[in-house]
Image (tube, helix red, strand yellow):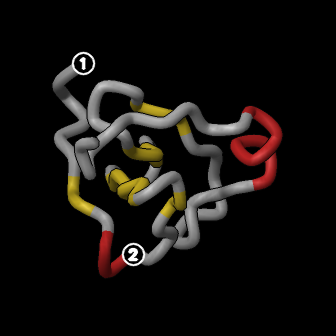
Amino acid sequence: MSDNKTLAVDPKLLEILVCPLTKGPLIFDRENNELVSKTASLAYPIRNGIPIMLVDEAREIDETSD
């Protein structure tokens, strides 16, 4: 089994979780297995099915690319 296995995120969990920096909504990026805050331009990783909601663990994303 791969450690990078993409797991589905429970839609109810997505309704509850917000960006810890902006308190804004998050979008599940299935391809990169991350929760994305467009407002903060940050992507929070999901490891072993658990969202890591720490700003220090997030990676900066380029808003201009879609």
Direction from residue 55 to residue 22 in the image, left or right: right
Tag 2's secondary structure?
A: helix
Indicate the quadrant containing the N terminus: top left, top right, bottom left or bottom right: top left
Determine which quarter of the picture holds residue 23: bottom right
Q: Mark 1 Cα within 10 Å, few/some/many (few <14, many 20+)?
A: few
- Point 51% across, 69% down: residue: 53
Residue at the outermost top position: 66
Q: Which residue is mark 1?
A: 66
Horizontal and vertical percent for residue 50?
53, 60
- Point 56% across, 32% down: residue: 8
Q: Which residue is mark 2?
A: 55
Horizontal and vertical percent for residue 54?
44, 77
- Point 51% across, 52% down: residue: 49
Direction from residue 26 to residue 47 in the image, left or right: left
Horizontal and vertical percent for residue 33?
36, 40
Indicate the quadrant containing the C terminus: top left, top right, bottom left or bottom right: top left
The residue nearer to you, when weighing 50 against 37, is: 50
* Dot 2 amino acid type: Val
